[in-house]
Image (cartoon, rainbow, N blue to C red):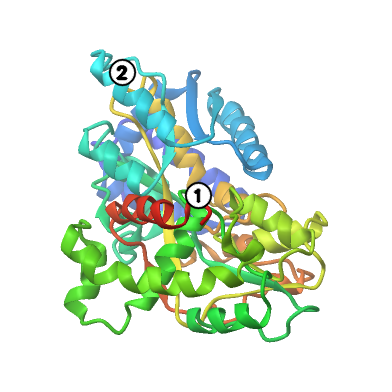
Amino acid sequence: MQLDKQIFPSTICNIMKHIVAATALGISVYACLWISVAYSQPHKLAAWELIETRGVNQDVYFHAWGGDPQINRYIQWVAEQVKQQYQITLHHVKLTDTGEAVSRVLAEKSANNDNNGQVDLVWINGENFAAMAKHQLLTPNWVAQLPNFALTDPDNNPAMTRDFGVPTQGMEAPWGKAALTFYYDSLLTQTPPQTLQQLNIWSKQYPGRFSYPKPPDFLAMSFLKYALITLNDSQPETIKNRLYQQADAQSQALLLPALWQYLDDLHPYLWRKGQHFMSSGLALRRLMGDGELTLAFTFSATEVPAAIARFDLPDSTRSYRMRDGSLSNIHFIAIPYNAAHTDSAKLVVNFLLSPKAQAKKQQANVWGDTSVIALSQLPAAQQMWFEPPAQSHPSANVTNQDISPALSEPHPSWTKVIATQWLQRYGVMR
């Protein structure tokens, strides 16, 4: 057999480079993969090679939340990797709120700065993605160019191309996924609540031992959206489906009363009788570590054993998912429409989607963020990278996760509606 004549020599060299590397690792499947690409998609392979050529030896400004030391250290590790591989200098621009990056890009567009923006990459999802897409602030149709995007198996995993129910249209690449996970001190309660309704009963039995952060904190909104979905589960499908559409006055009138009624009943039995709410999920975890709470929750299950290992949580902490459902979502990375280093940004994102980077990120002592890679797309040797350590802490075994239904995020418009009305009702001590 002869290689397709459309493949020019440099592309063949690139293919052979990967084959040699794969053979050295004993992973012959990669040789087959790259030969297959060479035969079936020579132009696509050549296009990626051109991106690699143009993207090396550049700066990339990655605007991402900087509130967690573990995540910050992981991004620093990524910076070291892309420096070695591509001579790219990755700058982590630490944000307290992703809206800061959105506002910067919007201001640049207003000033007609369409080619030399200061944001090359931005970590976003949900409401911020919807806002940037609405104002045409994102580069379209670039994600399919990434060789490693195929590892997410998007054809059989539609969640990889939808953000809070909104089609991404190639404007952002998935980076990680998570689900609402509860954790408790097993020395203080052996029968934690298994449903939202049981949570109300449990809170009355253990007053002051549970709470949630104050909106618009992300974890607070996750709990409230979980409650909103669950409390309306018995509604007709036509009404429930309105959670995944733009929130208008009629849908709010149909769906929100159940949430406010539930919270009115729950709040007197929360920490500090529901008259004070902590500012963040990190503060919630600290209250668990200090012994003030018996039950809490997180959006990253592996955060719990990692916190135990750091002695931030008691060794008796255990994790589980609610039987009536777990709010689940995927977080993404996007390239603004006016990014100054687009090709370099694509190289960084492709690395972030590599098995090496995804397996590293999933380690509990690194970050604990669940991978978006479909393990079926990997050779057996690399699938083993994602297995939990044999001597992992019992809290790493999240009970009920196989039977807890995955609840999809509502339409992004519900986030602002819930937060605004919550603050009107509960934001001022009464």
Q: Seen in the image, is 64 located left or right of residue 346? A: right
Q: Which mark is residue 247?
A: none
Q: Nearer the viewer, residue 159 or 307?
A: 307
Q: Is residue 278 left or right of residue 353?
A: right
Q: Amino acid at mark 1?
A: Asp
Q: Would you identify the image quadrant in which residue 189 lies? A: bottom right
Residue 247: quadrant of the picture: bottom left
Give the crowd class for mark 2: few <14, some 14-19, many >=20 residues within 10 Å: some
Residue drawn at 60 percent across, 72 percent down: 269
Q: Is residue 16 above or below residue 366?
A: above
| Inter-mark Cα distance, 2 to 1 | 27 Å
As drawn, 180 above or below 191: above
| Residue shown at the point (42%, 24%) measured from the top left | 55
Q: From what the image shows, is residue 234 above or below residue 276?
A: below
The picture places residue 404, in percent across and down from the top left corner, at: 48, 80
The secondary structure type at the circle numbered 1 is loop
Q: Which mark is residue 217?
A: 1
Q: Nearer the viewer, residue 266 or 52?
A: 266
> Residue at coordinates 62% horizontally, 49% vertically from top-left?
24
174 on left or right of 185: left
Query: In the image, what residue occupies the spot 59% across and 82% down?
Result: 193
Res. 13 in view: no
Does the rendering let one see residue 329? Answer: yes
* Within-10-Å neighbours for mark 1: few <14, some 14–19, many 20+: some
Q: Give the image location of residue 127, x and y in percent.
A: 33, 46
Res. 383 image quadrant: bottom right
Question: Which residue is the site of mark 2?
Answer: 108
Amino acid type of the residue tagged 2 in the rendering: Glu
| Disc 2 secondary structure class | helix
**Residue 237, percent across and down?**
21, 79
Q: Position of residue 407 (x, y in %)?
A: 39, 71
- Which of 93/261 is in front? 261
